[in-house]
Amino acid sequence: MVVDQYAVPSYKEINPAIYTIISFPFLFGVMYGDVGHGSVLLAVAVFLMLFGGSLSARIESLRDVYEFRYMLFLMAFFSVYCGFMYNDFMSLPLNLFKSCYDTKTRIRIDEECVYPVGIDPIWYGSK
């Protein structure tokens, strides 16, 4: 459905759908990486995967979204993943681990300190 707008591949041509299935949702996650917004989208996608079949039979406008449910799930998954990498929750920094910097002086506490996952939240206060 995503690739059909460019035409169906001819004989011995590479089908771009295989690459698009992963690269499009991942790039969506890179652009909109946020744990909070991605979790809401993930809940909608899981709801569509579980109950969308019976709902799309009754509600005609839901049929197009129902066909897109797996792509929506991948987009939401990568959005949550990149949100953890960016330490973003509803545009607020997540402080999951101890910072490597002193919050008052903004001087590095230990030269050996490495923030385990994502960006150290002290960088959100920098100029």
Image: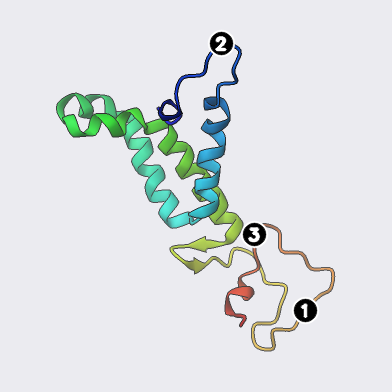
Residue at which label 3 appears: 118
Q: Residues within 10 Å of mark 1 (few under 14, many from 20)?
A: few
Q: Are dots 2 and 1 in contact, CB under 8 Å? A: no
User: Residue 99 location in percent, x, y?
Assistant: 67, 72
User: Residue 120 location in percent, x, y?
Assistant: 65, 68
Real-space CA distance between mark 2 and mark 1, rounded to the nearest whole angstrom:
61 Å
| Label 1 SS | loop
Give the residue at x 64% y 82%: 103
The quadrant in which residue 51 appears is top left
| Label 3 SS | loop
Residue at which label 2 appears: 11
Which of 52/12 is in front?
12
Name, please, the residue furthest toward the right.
112
Residue type pointed to by label 1:
Ile
Q: Are dots 1 and 3 in contact, CB under 8 Å? A: no
Give the residue at x 48% y 37%: 74
Q: Residues within 10 Å of mark 3 (few under 14, many from 20)?
A: some
Residue 60: which numbered mark, if any?
A: none
| Label 2 SS | loop
Residue type pointed to by label 2:
Tyr
Real-space CA distance between mark 3 and mark 2, rounded to the nearest whole angstrom:
44 Å
Q: In the visual, does 24 lie left or right of 39?
A: right
**Quick check: 107 above or below 115?**
below
Give the residue at x 79% y 68%: 113
Residue at which label 1 appears: 109
Pointer 3 or 2: first along the chain: 2
